[in-house]
Amino acid sequence: MSVIVHRRDLDFLLHELLDLDRLFATARYDGLDRPMVTGLLDTAQAIAEQHYLPLAASLDANEPRFVDGRAEIMPEVGEALRAYADAGLIAAGFDTDAGGLQLPYTVTVAMNGMFNAANIGIANYAMLTTANANMLNAFGTDAQKQVFLPPMLEGRWLGTMCLSEPQAGSSLSDIRTQAHPIGDNRYRISGTKMWISGGDHDLSENIVHMVLAKIPGGPAGVKGISLFLVPKYRVGADGKPGESNNIALAGLNHKMGHRGTTNCLLNFGEDGDCIGELIGEPHNGLRYMFHMMNEARISVGHGAVMSALSGYLHAFDYACGRTQGRLPRDKDPETPQVPIIEHADVRRMLMAQKAAVEGGLSLIFHCAMLVDLKKVTEDEEERSRIGLLLELLTPIAKSWPSEHCLEANKLAIQVFGGYGYTRDYPVERLYRDNRLNHIHEGTYAIHGIDLLGRKVRMQDGEALRLLVSDILQTIDGVRADDGLDAESRHLRAAVDQLQSTTAQVLACADLSRGLANATLYLDAFGHVVIAWMWLRQALEAQKRLRPLPGENAFYAGKIAACRYFFRYELPKAVRQLELVASLDETCLDLSPDQLLAR
Amino acid sequence: MSVIVHRRDLDFLLHELLDLDRLFATARYDGLDRPMVTGLLDTAQAIAEQHYLPLAASLDANEPRFVDGRAEIMPEVGEALRAYADAGLIAAGFDTDAGGLQLPYTVTVAMNGMFNAANIGIANYAMLTTANANMLNAFGTDAQKQVFLPPMLEGRWLGTMCLSEPQAGSSLSDIRTQAHPIGDNRYRISGTKMWISGGDHDLSENIVHMVLAKIPGGPAGVKGISLFLVPKYRVGADGKPGESNNIALAGLNHKMGHRGTTNCLLNFGEDGDCIGELIGEPHNGLRYMFHMMNEARISVGHGAVMSALSGYLHAFDYACGRTQGRLPRDKDPETPQVPIIEHADVRRMLMAQKAAVEGGLSLIFHCAMLVDLKKVTEDEEERSRIGLLLELLTPIAKSWPSEHCLEANKLAIQVFGGYGYTRDYPVERLYRDNRLNHIHEGTYAIHGIDLLGRKVRMQDGEALRLLVSDILQTIDGVRADDGLDAESRHLRAAVDQLQSTTAQVLACADLSRGLANATLYLDAFGHVVIAWMWLRQALEAQKRLRPLPGENAFYAGKIAACRYFFRYELPKAVRQLELVASLDETCLDLSPDQLLAR
């Protein structure tokens, strides 16, 4: 059985729950059908299992090294990326005109998930290249696209995103990298960029950096940030990489996980000789960078889910095979030991993982479908509705899995016991990998402030109203004989509480106080959304229950997981929302010397 | 400022909260006084900071290696252990007759905590040696003690505990290692032991293993387990280590954390030539092993607290120094960035760490004092009362920190942001180290079953009644003008609910169902106990508040942390107890193919 994907669940989510087929009826995806999607998923799974998965442990143990000013990395990583690129996967979401496969985002997400689960350290290089190419495709000139897009989509050149600097991580308004115009849309770049994933390596012929920098004389803060395309090697008239562009690798960050991805401190223009091209208009860099940000953030949440899914699949297999101890009633040491999946707490830990993983995955695909529907919908009002929902759900899709799927990875280790704590099993690595997702692409706290400080306030709360309306529609669809009465009542109450809590915070004139518990609000909001996802899954499963034993187990499991989430998890959100609504200032009021007087 | 101990808090716990001085009035600790204790703590801190702390990162990066059948380890580890032993710290808790310092357990715990925080990988060797020597001292013959005790207490020989085997981790009744009598209290040992910390190394002249094994013909299960002393090198008539005792290092386990401690697979008697001496009577091995088990488990919980304390101290310092972003009201990018401790969510994360760490530490010292009071109390009834309280509280002291102080370590990383995820800062290592505590010395689930299946049922619930009586005494001591009314009411309600939940589970005839959510019961029980600890700390702080600004900050911080715990944490226990009382079977009823139908 695969340890990187649960294909039955993927089919359920894509086809039974979310009705992917409706995309095939649109002009954009005309010609695509379900067997083709299945074939694509088969291909992706085969490449991920053959080229990515076998390297996971060795790449983790042999992280990239800083040698003679360069990052050296296991050469097999390049071969794996080649297999991925050769299958057209970097370009999978691009239009056929641009050399892509023009696949729905939902399908590319499903495919990429397997690579994330198999080896996130390698998958990052391709993910960043796709994101980079997307931005270039959206805002670059035709000439820029002609030179840079084909080699990136073919995987011969890889891409990065250069936002952070040592003094500016979460606070991008404080970046200091400068870009001095030298005419002809070209700029001399100078500055230091930090946390650059894929910032240096020997895996590709060239590296294309998308760099945020300030043009002297521009506005202060984020309004003065521009975007530049800065290749590692300058590109000659023949379109080939030529002389070095004066970008120095100043150091590698050695991380707890994601070890296969080089993470770099880069000095641009130490000798004053680093040239970049402006992308789009000056001072619009952040807007361009955020153009694909919803998708990038959904991807991070998805990565968190997939690390947890792989942990869960490993833990399930182990629990079925490992024998240890006896059931509470049976203390006779002469009887054989039982598989540990027979123990109540092991089942609880597996169920907790299932609820987090399948709940999180359903939200990721729900959001991915919104991305696709927004693209194909011709109705302006509907497009705006979908856009608002995406704005609201993105911080949740990014954050909820980074917290609760990390917890799932923790439980996967626990199922393995002492073995899980060793590097002989992959669960500790998956746990280390997943810890990053809480931090990058906006920390948990930043997304809390985004959600409570901005998203639920947009258009006088329209986004939240739209979401609540969608949730109530699900609740209204519950029939008396579904056996899901209690769940639908609980969800209804939780939604009411979410709305009243939101109103109470928004009525608070003191912004600091109102936002003091934004992280808890984000967490609780996420629980309400995941509860909704579980009710939807359970309803769908209920509808499909048949007297066929095999399939029944799958659907019965969905219904049980829904019950689990409502009984074991949703009440936590209720309590947290009460706390948020109380506008508690216990932490806000603290002075540092009260925290720690020495 | 130290990153391994918070001396002001230690003084508060030992002297203001727990009144350590009352031990000095007893015959056993006559001559000891507060300045001496302070001096001992100074000494311990100095050794830990000079010899243990500087090796923490390098030892983590250079874990022991398997070379030519031996475990090779950084030689500086031996030097650090020598400094510890030379200060008399292995023997610190032993009677002066036995060559020890005859210090209260509470004091040795306080000292050892600093070594745990500084470098748990080294501290483990000494901790295991002390535990081993304790067992030998309690159950060995005079001859055995004469040969083995002095070199262990001097740190020239180190000790281990050999319980687990590859097929028997949590289920000790299933061990297979055999001991064949060859006369004169000597046995031929054969079998494989797994997870043996300190099982092989070149740090000492000899290694003394305490090995659980079965004498053929004995009773099945745990009743047939005996305890043997098995040295790595046989000891000659001159008391010196001589020929090899046929114990082969079969492999090293490579762990996520605790990397400095060798963790071994050992084959005893591969060539039929491994000789051990029986300790005590046959078939009583488990009882001997569990003799010091309460203390060993308190130590594990304490280790979890100390990893979190160190993470907290690092995070606090970083939050005071690192500038990033601006407050919600101030969006002018021309103003300077603020120290991140000004951000509400950073304060919340620091407060959560403080609440877990100082709450956990107060429970550890509460239990340590019970160990000491039990030793010096002459009243039989009081001794039995203390014994029952210790039995009840030990699974909590072991488990609560392993869960909630791990969470604190997670938050320490989050305070550091991307930096915290790198190995350039110690917080990710402390997080990895702490993940073990959930697993060893009995998993979280095992302690849940111990608590709900055994401890609260002992003597018809007497232990729980005694604890509740202690808690109610604290509540009764709250006066109207303490400002802690709400907290005392909440604690009262939580205790009532704990009692009624316990009664509901105990009334359930179906043992499997009753124990199905034992882990949640353990967790919630822990929260109630820690809430009690916080109320006690807040009451003590309230009493000592003075109009002196410096001291006020310390006490005000204690009161704030109490409020935090009651508002942000205790309600979680209320919800969990409701769930346990409902005897929910959602997870128990699952079949494996419902969990994962493929």
Image: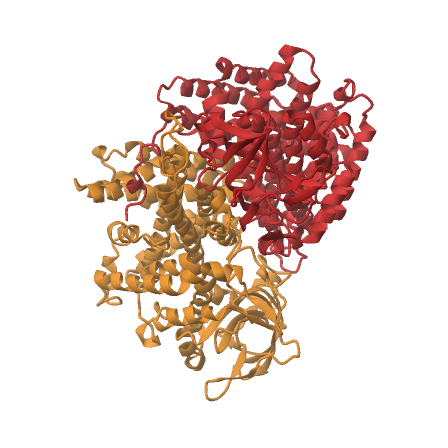
Chain colours: A orange, B red
Residue A193 found in image quarter: bottom right
Residue at the (44%, 73%) spot, across then down: A136
Task: Specify whether residue B583 is in view.
Answer: no
Could you tell whether A432 is left or right of A365 in the image?
right
Residue A289: percent from left, percent from top: 48, 65
Residue drawn 37% across and 19% down? B508
Above or below for B469 versus B558 = above
Place of residue B220 in the rendered image (x, y in percent of width and height, measured from the top left): 43, 27
Q: Determine whether B173 is above or below B308 in the image.
A: above
| Number of numbered discs visible in the structure rendering | 0
**In the shown orientation, is residue B279 left or right of residue B593?**
right
Most foreground residue, B507 or B359 = B507
Q: B285 or A2, which lies in front?
A: B285
Residue B228 visible:
yes
Instruction: Please provide percent x and percent y for residue A247.
Output: 60, 75
> Residue farthest to the left?
A547
Q: Quadrant of the N terminus of chain B?
A: top right
Residue at the (54%, 17%) spot, across then down: B463
B348 and A420: which is toward the camera: A420
Whether A173 is drawn above or below B515: the answer is below
Estimate the x, y position of residue A328 in percent, counting from the top left. Answer: 39, 27
**Residue most extreme to the front:** B183
Q: Is residue B268 left or right of residue A129?
A: right
